[in-house]
Amino acid sequence: MPALTRNKKKGAKSQTPPLIKRTKSNPTPPPKKAAKSHKPPLKKQRKGVSDEKPEVSNDEEEEEEEVSEQSDEGDELGSDFFSDGDEEEDTEPLGDDFLDGNDDEERTLGSDSDSDLEKESKAIDEERERQERDAKDELQMNIKEQPDEFRLPTKKELEEEASGPPDLPALQTRIKEIVRVLSNFKDLRPEGVKRKEFVEQLKADLASYYGYNEFLIGTLVEMFPPVELMELIEAFEKQRPTSIRTNTLKTRRRDLADVLLNRGVNLDPLSKWSKVGLVVYDSQVPIGATPEYLAGFYMLQSASSFLPVMALAPRENERVVDMAAAPGGKTTYVASLMKNTGIIYANEMKVPRLKSLTANLHRMGVTNTIVCNYDGRELPKVFGPNSVDRVLLDAPCSGTGVISKDESVKTSKSANDIRKFADLQKQLILAAIDLVDAESKTGGYIVYSTCSIMIPENEAVIDYALKKRDVKLVPCGLDFGQAGFSRFREHRFHPTLEKTRRFYPHVHNMDGFFVAKLKKMSNETKASEGDEPVETKEQAQLSSDEDDDDESIKELKKPSGANVDMNKQRISISKANNKGKKNKNFKTENANVEGPRKQKKKRSQWKAEIAQAREDKRKVMRENTKEPGRR
């Protein structure tokens, strides 16, 4: 019977879930035996009903009939109920528990899934909190393990690093720590360690991490403080924005921008300091092959190349020389500012680069330019001294300001290369000054620029020109840029070098550049005290003649026996030739070069004494050469 009861209950629950709830809410009286006697036929009926798949309403009616029968027969079966109390105690809790258990299962079917989700989410949150807690603990442990005082690696550690491949993360961490210590060395200085040791280790790490040679990274470390040095080196690792210059001979910047925007070019005005520049972010078409480019509406040109021409500020109907013109970006900019008036001499020493220069001049519609191929140092002889109004000298340089374009500079440049470039630049700037006419009504200016940040190629060259020629520095006319160095380590330059301008990629987001503007005060050469006097061509010839005279006097004093007469004749012939050379030189070029007497007035006392001694030697030589003729 208990088994039968379970089957009946299970069948009732499986067929009519709402009925179970009703029976639980309205419990029936205790008599169970009568119900047991009627349960077998009800089971058969339910089996038939389950086979026929009746509606839920039929099951409910049957259940109500069963409940009413149990209530009617409750009195008749009272004795049986009490006699079978023990049996009912066994069966009733089983049925109730079974029903309750089934009801709990039904209620917890949905709640179990919710509780499982809650448990999983709680477990995930707890795991996340645990990981965060462990990370904080590990960080605190690392902080405790690493003292505030940074420790330099020992020789043994450095040897181990050198034996294997470079550990870039470790190098980067050490560079940051060294920069942190050097930026506040007074407070963070470790005991017993000198600043020089930190600097040397920083040089080695930077050279290894970024790929610089020892000379270049050493120079940069000397020029910049540690924090700014890191900003500069990081800026060299990134490309500068692409910029274009509008050709105002053919179009306006607004019209060009509209056309390029329609072609899918994303651009903006370059900056407030330029009225013709545009910066290009990205383009759906090749920016160097658009119809507008081929028509000469714009020129691909770096922003730093605008600066020398803006400093030169040429005017209409002037004579201007561009001493190193290729590929023509600056020359075409000068032509557009002059509105194709006046004359521009575009000189380029390297023949292969003349093609690009000529092509760009034709494409941009420039008609006032003459292209020539000379060594820039010889231009004063070609055009004549004091013959032009303005000169633009974008001198050949080491290219240390454009490392982002050419990374080979990191390892290819040495101190000897910088020295060679500096010597060439000094000769070129003297030639540029000699070309300019100081008496020009509108001009008389020289602009010197390089794409280098090395001091020997920039401030040292300008300081040399200030000593050798009668020129002075004037403001460049640029509202931005850092002032040049007036002193660097043991070097002391002219105080006016602060008027020069330096541009850096980490500050101005353009290539490293240097610009200086000179004004020629007079057409005379200048020799300052403490420096060797500057020799013109005539003075060099005179000095060589004086050396020949000294040698001839020494030969006259030597006893030569039978060959004395022959030596005297040779000396007299050479002297006569030298006199002829002197007279010719003074006749042809005396108008442009002042005589040696005027130069003597500007020399110091000891130089005047030397000149007087040379004159006395000449007189002695003349007397000695006249004596054989009289005899």
Image (cartoon, rainbow, N blue to C red):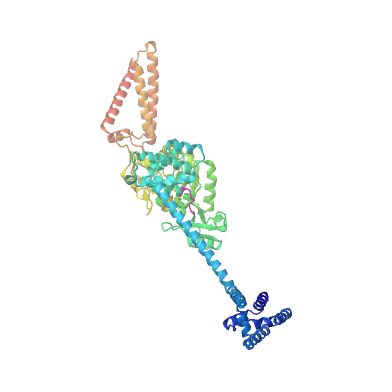
The foreground one among 610 and 103 is: 103
Q: Which residues are magenta?
A: 235-242
Q: Magenta span: helix, strand or loop, mainly?
A: loop
Q: What residue is drawn where x is 51% and y is 64%?
A: 122
Residue 269 falls within the magenta-colored stretch: no
Instruction: Tell me residue 417's x, y (percent).
Output: 45, 37
As drawn, which residue projects farthest toward the bottom? 72
Residue 469 is left or right of residue 260, and the answer is: left
Quadrant of the frame with the N terminus: bottom right
Res. 533 visible in picture:
yes
In this rendering, is residue 32 above or below 270? below
In x, y percent, where is residue 102?
61, 74
Quick check: 543 left or right of 288?
left
Residue 385 in which image quadrant: top left
Q: Position of residue 237 (x, y in %)?
A: 48, 48
Q: Is residue 239 magenta?
A: yes
**Above or below — where is 415 with respect to 288?**
above
Q: Is residue 552 left or right of residue 40?
A: left
Tell me which corner region of the image, top left, top right, bottom left or bottom right, holds residue 295.
bottom right
Q: Is residue 121 above or below residue 239?
A: below
The residue lying toward the viewer, choosing from 616 and 262, is 262
Residue 324 spot, x, y in % from top left: 47, 44
Judge whether residue 278 can be spotted in this image. no
Q: Farthest residue in the top direction? A: 562
